[in-house]
Image (spheres, helix red, strand yellow):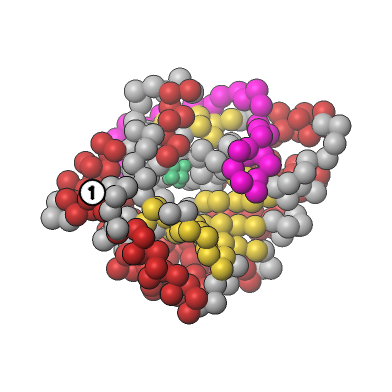
Amino acid sequence: MPKGDFRVREVMAKSVLNPSRIGGVAYAINPYVGCQHACSYCYARFMSRYTGHQGERWGSFVDIKVNAARVLQQQLRRRRNPVRGSVLFSSVTDAYQPLERRYKVTRNCLELLRNHGVPVSVLTKSDLVLRDLDLLGEIPDTEVGMTVITLDEKVRRVFEAGAPPAERRVAALTECASQGIQTYAFVGPIIPYLSTPSLEDLISQLAESGVSYLFFDRLNIKYGNRLIIEEALRTAFPKQSHDILAALQQTSLYYPQLRTELEVIVRHHHLDADFLF
Ligand code: SF4
């Protein structure tokens, strides 16, 4: 966890199973509001505004939806038709952030989805997901994805201060795949010049882990992350910050050229990949 004040609240959710606009995902469950992983680039920080946390630093608070399993149970019972499509954990938080170890909100919801035979898609940065392999293994068509931006621990600590090292995430993917669970990796946001030196090695490790496919994404300046990213770059990477910010311009050729290079590496490893840039 990054240093500084941190506030945890237990809250009551009204709805837990919510329709999602993300492609290929029918519903999303967000067991928490806020995220201890505290990524400086996080696009979910806009949630502060809608959840009574206006003005609070993203990563400095987490609300725990302590009644989530009960609400989900009611929502599943009330449905006239079975849930079609998969349920994503999570779209605006990380369902396996450290507090999950104690509160088990995600696990309790997973148990219900397992009982109803609803396919689940997990996207996390934490190997805590391994705790729930027993449940995930019992849900048909389930997949586990890990987000990884670099193998470089210095870069990880600056941009994902509260998340586990990449090495543990790749090891978790290996373990999931060895248990017969489909896995994928979300490689992004790729930070110009900082992520790239370890990308080839990362892709090679992901291929060895047994992932079925990869997503690649660029770093986007949006949802109020500009100042935090600029501050992180100024403080930790002052010499590179100018070039990095230039590469983020929409007119820059940095990402198109990187994509070409990545396509070659991905082909070399016989992996399927989607590029979001
Ligand atoms: S893990 Fe995901 S939700 Fe949590 S801070 Fe990082 S990007 Fe945001």
Q: Quadrant of residue 192?
A: bottom left
Number of labels in the image equals 1
Asked if residue 117 lies left or right of residue 198, the reply is right
Residue 66 picture location, percent across and down = 61, 30
* 77 relative position to 164: left or right: right
Asked if residue 102 is among those painted magenta in the image, a careful observer would answer no
Q: Nearer the viewer, residue 276 or 232?
A: 276
Whereabouts is ligand 1, in terms of quadrant? Answer: top left
Answer with left or right where residue 25 lies relative to residue 171: right
| Residue 7 visible, this angle | yes
Q: What is the three-letter code of the residue carrying label 1?
A: Leu
| Depicted 184 relative to depicted 116: above or below | below
Q: Quadrant of the N terminus?
A: top left
**Could you say where residue 165 lies in the image, as x and y percent from the top left?**
39, 59
- Quadrant of the image for the C terminus? bottom left
Residue 80 locus on image (x, y percent): 86, 32
**In the image, residue 93 lies at what x, y percent?**
50, 39
The image shows residue 194, relative to residue 205, as above or below, that is above
Q: Secondary structure at mark 1?
A: helix
* Span shown in magenta: 1-29
The residue at 34%/23% (across/down) is: 55
Is residue 205 at least partly visible in the picture?
Answer: no
Asked if the stretch drawn in magenta spans residue 22, the answer is yes
Query: Which residue sits furthest left?
Result: 239
Report whether 254 appears left or right of 176.
left
The residue wearing badge 1 is 245
